[in-house]
Every structure is written in structure tokens, then in C-alpha cells.
Image (cartoon, rainbow, N blue to C red):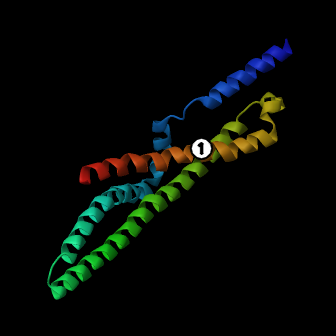
């Protein structure tokens, strides 16, 4: 019956929606933004090395503060305070490179995915749009939500895969 056919179509659509996004395809779609990804990949490496460097500088500060001579202690404390400032500046640029470049790259990826999705919708036969599941509102919602879900795969996962091992290696 028509009800069974509609239920089967709905179940197939729900199963397709639950399928994971192929990571390689997302990376391939994002290749034109390599000029943003290359500096963006340097950011997590530097950011991953920040905490171990912070620990080394902090131990040096404690060593400088333990000196009995006041002038030597002040000189050492001032030097290591400047090192903390330098570490803060490096962290600023590393986080900007890590987050900013991946955001720019992700926005270009979202735009490209929306264009491809819209082109695929335009290639559908007329009967496709007669189905209640493919109404104008639902298709517009898919254009806005599906591309956003793919964006998180690209930047945040790559960022974490680079930052965590760097912290472990440097530490």
C-alpha cells in the first residue's frame, strides 16, 4: 500500500542521514583552502608545546626566587617574567593560527558544500519535490544544517589530532 511505501522511504532516508561523513571526502573538498590550512596546522603544534614550556619557565622562576642574593633574585625574576610575556604572545598567535585559520577554511568548506547540495537538488526530477519529506522548508533546512555539521569534522578534529600528540611529545 501507499502507506507502507511511504514508511519505507522514510526509514531509508533516516538511515542515510545517520551514516557517518567520509573524512577523506571532506578533506578533498577542503583542498582549495590549503593556504589557510597550512598555517592552521602550525598553530596546534605550537599550542601543544606551550604547556610544557610553561612548566619549564615556572621551574626556572622558582629557582630564581630561591636565590639568597636580592639583586640576583630580582634580575632572574625580571628575566623569567619577560619569558612569560613572550610565551603569552606566542600563545596568542598560535591560538589565532589554530582557531582563525580553521574557521576561515571551514567557512569556505561550508559554502562549497552548500553549492554542491543545492546543485544536486536542482538536478532532481520534478516528482522529488512532490514528496512531503522534500518540501521547500525541509530542503532549505538541510542546506543550512548539514553543511554546518560537516564543518566540525574538518577543523576541530584535525586540531585535536595534532595538538594532543605534540603536547605529549614535547612534555
Residue 2 % position (x, y) = 85, 15
Residue at x-position 37% and y-position 56%:
44
Where does residue 52 sit, x and y in percent of width and height? Answer: 28, 59
Q: Nearer the viewer, residue 68 or 87?
A: 68
Q: Is residue 138 left or right of residue 157?
A: right
Secondary element under disc 1, as helix, strand or loop, is helix
Q: Which residue is mark 1?
A: 149
Between residues 50 and 78, which one lies in front from this camera angle?
A: 78
Residue 22 visible in the snapshot: yes
What crowding class fits label 1: few (fewer than 14 Cα within 10 Å), some (14-19), or many (20 or more)? few
Q: In percent of the image, x 17 and y 88: which residue is there? A: 71
Q: Position of residue 18 (x, y in %)?
A: 61, 30
Residue 30, visible in the rendered structure? no
Against 45, is 6 above or below?
above
Would you place residue 4 above or below residue 46 in this image?
above
What is the quadrant of the N terminus in the image? top right
Identify the image quadrant of residue 46. Answer: bottom left
Amino acid at each position: 500500500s501507499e502507506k507502507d511505501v511511504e514508511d519505507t522511504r522514510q526509514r531509508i532516508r533516516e538511515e542515510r542521514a545517520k551514516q557517518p561523513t567520509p573524512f577523506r571526502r571532506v578533506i578533498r573538498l577542503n583542498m582549495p583552502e590549503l593556504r589557510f590550512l597550512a598555517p592552521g596546522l602550525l598553530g596546534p603544534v605550537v599550542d601543544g608545546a606551550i604547556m610544557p614550556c610553561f612548566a619549564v619557565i615556572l621551574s626556572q622562576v622558582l629557582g630564581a626566587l630561591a636565590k639568597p642574593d636580592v639583586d640576583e633574585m630580582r634580575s632572574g625574576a625580571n628575566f623569567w617574567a619577560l619569558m612569560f610575556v613572550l610565551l603569552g604572545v606566542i600563545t596568542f598567535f598560535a591560538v589565532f593560527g589554530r582557531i582563525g585559520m580553521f574557521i576561515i577554511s571551514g567557512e569556505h568548506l561550508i559554502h562549497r558544500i552548500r553549492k554542491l547540495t543545492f546543485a544536486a537538488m536542482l538536478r532532481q526530477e520534478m516528482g522529488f519535490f512532490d514528496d512531503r519529506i522534500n518540501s521547500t522548508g525541509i530542503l532549505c533546512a538541510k542546506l543550512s544544517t548539514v553543511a554546518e555539521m560537516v564543518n566540525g569534522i574538518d577543523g576541530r578534529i584535525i586540531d585535536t589530532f595534532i595538538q594532543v600528540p605534540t603536547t605529549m611529545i614535547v612534555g
